[in-house]
Image: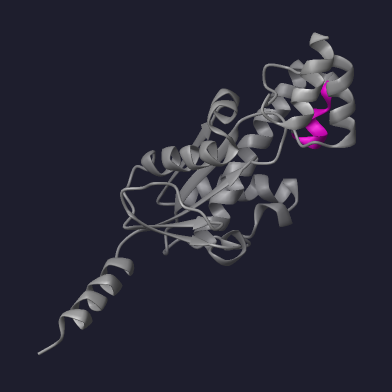
Amino acid sequence: MRSKKFLQAEQAILAWDVPGLVAGVDEAGRGPLAGPVVAAAVILDDHQPIKGLADSKKLTALRREKLFDEIRAKALCCSVALATVEEIDRLNILQATMLAMQRAVKGLRLKPAKVLVDGNRLPVLDVVAEAIVSGDALVPAISAASILAKVTRDRMLDELHALHPLYGFDRHKGYGTAQHVAALREHGPLPEHRRSFAPVAQATKEHVA
């Protein structure tokens, strides 16, 4: 007869390695000074493999765009969600990122049995989840999620550039480059800038003064 301790350990293993659909989750836009943080969740189809999946940051923009379309066409299901600049400033960037990930998982048409998240932190979910450091380079479903999130966010920043070309969003995508910080100080923050981030807060003070 198996001991109570053995049974508890067995139950833990069974709970962790749940059979069924697995979703990969990643985000784009934690570091920039402007724009939302975007998260994506993807459940790949084992019968329609996608070649060339990798960490989105290691791919060219053209390659990301092509993979974006292929992922949307071949994945069993995928979902993209975001947390707004207002939510980032109110909650902080970490909690806003977790919120975007929650929304992405909830937006999946099929409910996964397990969720694999890039990084070392997990959003609160109602399914088994595991955080995987460098998961965007190790797990195809997370790689796919990283590509969907980055392409979606980059497109949003390109649209912002069309409205406000003086800030150069088409080049830096909201990150705190020297060009971006100089534009911030010269022209002042836009509503799309994150007031809780130090360079934006400083530029806000300068323009209020």
- The image shows residue 102 at horizontal and vertical percentages of 42, 41
- Relative height, residue 109 to residue 137 (above, below): above
Q: Residue at x 63, y 60 (%)?
A: 54
Colour scheme in use: one colour
- Pick the front one: 147 or 106: 106
Question: Viewed as shown, does residue 152 lie left or right of 11?
Answer: right
Q: Is residue 103 above or below residue 129?
A: above
Is 177 positioned to the left or the right of 40 in the image?
right
Q: Total number of numbered labels?
A: 0
The residue depicted at 79 percent of the width and 31 percent of the height is: 170
- Residue visible at 58% across and 67% down in the picture: 138
Outermost residue on the top side: it is 209
Q: Quadrant of residue 103?
A: top left
Tell me where residue 144 appears, x and y as whole percent. Answer: 55, 53
Residue 128 showing in the rendered view = yes
The magenta stretch spans which residues?
167-173
Q: Is residue 88 above or below residue 122?
A: above
The residue under the point 61% across, 62% down is 134
Quadrant in which the C terminus is drawn? top right
Q: Quadrant of the N terminus?
A: bottom left
Q: Position of residue 6 (x, y in %)?
A: 22, 83
